[in-house]
């Protein structure tokens, strides 16, 4: 049994913390939103008054926060108060530079640290099947891995500090681009009089197959669990996809990498979200491509 502090108990953090409780860990949680704390309490999390009190006796500290500036601010507050030798795991999706700065803060205070963003959305968080992409030295990863397992379907050590965030950014750029490509194909098929099911049956078993088609199909019917069957209620909101695409473009600019499709996907999701659809599932971009989203 490990004592874990969990900072950030929103749509992802709460089910992740709940799975840690189910695995037999003691979880001390904090969030700025009272309703999130109430949910956490109902899930067996020991709710704390603030982040510092949550981490004081914790062997492991997990953060799930909106952006790099939030992670760095929280790390500056809690790292000096953390238990000697504690492992810090940041599962937020943030820019690589901020991730490396967070590692540096932890190191300065004698703490082990891992950047470990996730893929799998709220469904994966609830089911305990998230993919964790971890960055940090091997000693830190080896201590973090057993804590991640109750929340994970897969855990990949991607490299040194910041490598987890780099993997997440690259993966989600692929996802954003591929969802637009699949959606464009279905819009064209509709214009040509080809049924959704016929296109799915062909593409899902030939060279057009990809996760955006076979697991998250943007039209209702072929994949019963996809958000298209729930009027695009989000498993992964368009605003979050836009955030990740913007991170990919910031990273591409800094690294001098050419990502023309990533840039175009960023523009399309920016327009979609700008029309008030940021809370729609990212697969709802098909409605924008049909001209229905304005």
Image (cartoon, helix red, strand yellow):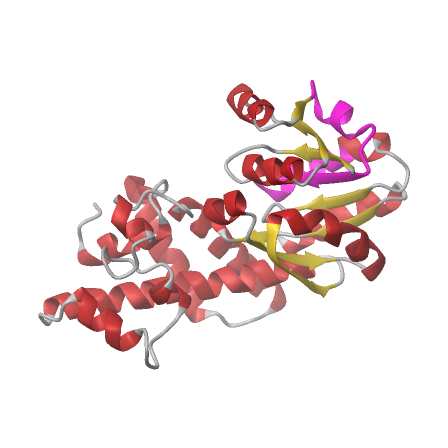
Q: Find the magenta span and give its range.
A: 48-76
Find out whether residue 50 is within the magenta segment. yes
Residue at (85, 57) in percent of width and height = 139
The picture quadrant where one finds residue 6 is top right
Q: Is residue 241 magenta?
A: no
The reply, left or right, for residue 1 in relation to residue 264 is right
Q: Residue at x 51, y 47 (%)?
A: 127
Tell which of 81 and 124 is nearer to you.
124
The C terminus lies in quadrant? top left
Up the image or down, 156 lies above or below 242; here it is: below
Residue 277 vs 29, above or below: the answer is below
| Whether residue 150 is situated above or below residue 54 in the rendered picture | below
Residue 181 horizontal/vertical position (percent):
32, 68
Position in image of residue 122 (x %, y %): 48, 44
Whether residue 214 is visible here, answered yes or no, is: yes
Q: Residue furthest left?
A: 193
Q: Position of residue 189 (x, y in %)?
A: 16, 70
Left or right: residue 251 versus residue 144 is left
Residue 289 occupies quadrant: bottom left
Image coordinates of residue 103 in percent, x first then y, are: 78, 49
Number of numbered discs overlaid on the protein picture: 0
Q: Could you tell me which quadrant the N terminus lies in? A: top right
């Amino acid at each position: 049994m490990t004592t874990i502090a969990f900072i950030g108990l929103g749509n992802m953090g709460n089910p992740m913390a709940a799975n840690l409780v189910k695995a037999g860990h003691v979880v001390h949680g904090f969030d700025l939103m009272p309703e999130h704390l109430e949910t956490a309490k109902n899930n067996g999390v020991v709710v704390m008054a603030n982040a510092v009190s949550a981490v004081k006796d914790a062997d492991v500290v997990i953060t799930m926060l909106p952006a790099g500036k939030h992670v760095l601010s929280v790390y500056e507050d809690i790292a000096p108060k953390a238990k000697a030798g504690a492992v810090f795991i940041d599962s937020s999706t943030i820019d690589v530079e901020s991730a490396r700065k967070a590692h540096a803060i932890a190191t300065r205070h004698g703490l082990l640290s891992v950047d470990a963003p996730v893929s799998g959305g709220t469904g994966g968080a609830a089911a305990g099947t998230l993919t964790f992409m971890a960055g940090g030295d091997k000693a830190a990863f080896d201590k973090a891995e057993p804590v991640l397992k109750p929340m994970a379907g897969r855990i990949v050590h991607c490299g040194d500090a910041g490598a987890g965030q780099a993997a997440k950014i690259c993966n989600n750029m692929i996802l954003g681009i591929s969802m637009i490509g699949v959606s464009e194909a279905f819009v064209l098929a509709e214009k040509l009089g080809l049924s959704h099911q016929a296109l799915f049956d062909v593409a899902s078993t030939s060279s057009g197959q990809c996760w955006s088609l076979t697991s998250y199909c943007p039209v209702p019917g072929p994949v019963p669990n996809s958000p298209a069957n729930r009027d695009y209620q989000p498993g992964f909101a368009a605003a979050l996809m836009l955030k990740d695409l913007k991170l990919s473009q910031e990273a591409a600019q800094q690294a001098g990498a050419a990502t023309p499709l990533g840039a175009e996907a960023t523009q399309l999701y920016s327009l979609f979200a700008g029309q008030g659809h940021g809370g729609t599932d990212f697969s709802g971009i098909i409605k924008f491509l049909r001209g229905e989203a304005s």
